[in-house]
Image (spheres, helix red, strand yellow):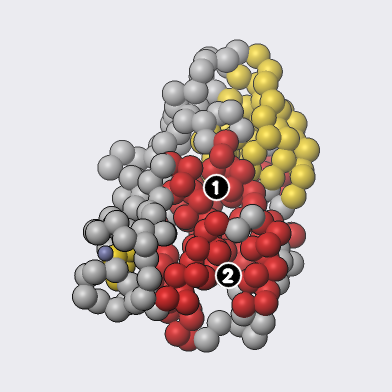
Amino acid sequence: MPSFFDASRDCGDAPARQGYWSASGVVLRRREDPHEGFRLLAFLKGTGLCWVNAPWAARGRRRFGAATEPLSWGEYRFYQSPRRTTLQDARLVDSYLSLHRDAESFREALEACLWLSRLPLGIPGDEVLGLFWSHFRALTLPLVRPPLRVRFLYRWLRVQGSAPELRRCSRCGEPLRGSLAWGRWGLECCAGRAEVPPDFLQDLCRAAMLAREPFVEWVKTRYPGGLSPSDRARWKEAEGWLQGFFPEGRSLFQKGEGS
Ligand SMILES: [Zn+2]
């Protein structure tokens, strides 16, 4: 697997630009270079993943305030030279502070950063960026997390055209009903295994399909007292199942920074 963290590359295959340019987006990762400043991996509208330099101000002082922190959303302005992309200015729109110091939300959002940071450099992914923004905003609300995560994964798969069908059996094509099995190509009604109870299929469809506002309302009313251990296990199964549909493979979801 190629290293998507190769910090020696700037904008990958993004069109060459010289001069100033601007883009909105989010910082996914940050590395500190004691001499030069920060190296930021940003996910930018119209550009996709891109390593940029955020140099120190004079005498090693930090510039740009919180706008270089991971999970900082903003409008960024760059100077493009033939060799590197340098941050010139940033207007912060939102940040991890909106997660209200909630450790689980923060962890969840950082994990999504990690997944996205493994995508190839320089491939525009505006729809995925929009989904991440929506996921981030949902994480600022007091909702149980696992349905949010499954929703994000399912919609990300849908953008890529690889989301599994949730209405029909992937083996026989019949409408899904009764107890179902998690299959390699989709849900199965005729596999002889009862892994997915019928009411959970309804939950899965709601998480995947509802528009944002109805989804938020549904999660609030569906799990007013939080998730039971069996609910949690069910969503975890759904998450693992969906990860298997990503063309990039499960390595996208490995724990830890990786390469
Ligand atoms: Zn079937």
- Say which residue appears at 44% left-offset and 70% top-offset: 201
Q: Find residue 197 and report its horizontal and vertical position in percent.
A: 40, 78
The quarter of the image holding the N terminus is top left
* Secondary structure found at label 2: loop
Residue at the far front: name it. Answer: 174
Q: Residues within 10 Å of mark 1 (few under 14, many from 20)?
A: many
Q: Find residue 95 and report its horizontal and vertical position in percent.
A: 71, 52
Q: Is residue 204 placed above or below 131 in the rendered structure?
A: below
Q: Find residue 34 and report its horizontal and vertical position in percent.
A: 58, 42
Q: Is residue 236 placed above or below 11 in the rendered structure?
A: below
- Say which residue appears at 56% left-offset and 82% top-offset: 227
Tell me whether circle 2 and circle 1 mark residues in contact (CB < 8 Å): no
Residue at the far left: name it. Answer: 192
Q: How many marks?
A: 2
Q: Find residue 111 and report its horizontal and vertical position in percent.
A: 51, 59
Regarding residue 218, the answer to whether it shows in the image is: yes
Q: Circle 1 sits on which residue?
A: 29
Where ligand 1 lies, by image quadrant?
bottom left
Q: Mark 2 is on which residue type?
A: Arg
Q: Circle 2 sits on which residue?
A: 145
**Residue 174, quarter of the rendered image:** bottom left
Mark 2 vs mark 1, CA separation in Å: 22 Å
Is 169 on the left or on the right of 79, as rendered? left
| Distance from mark 1 CB to nearest ligand 1 atom below 8 Å | no
**Which one is in front, 106 or 195?**
195
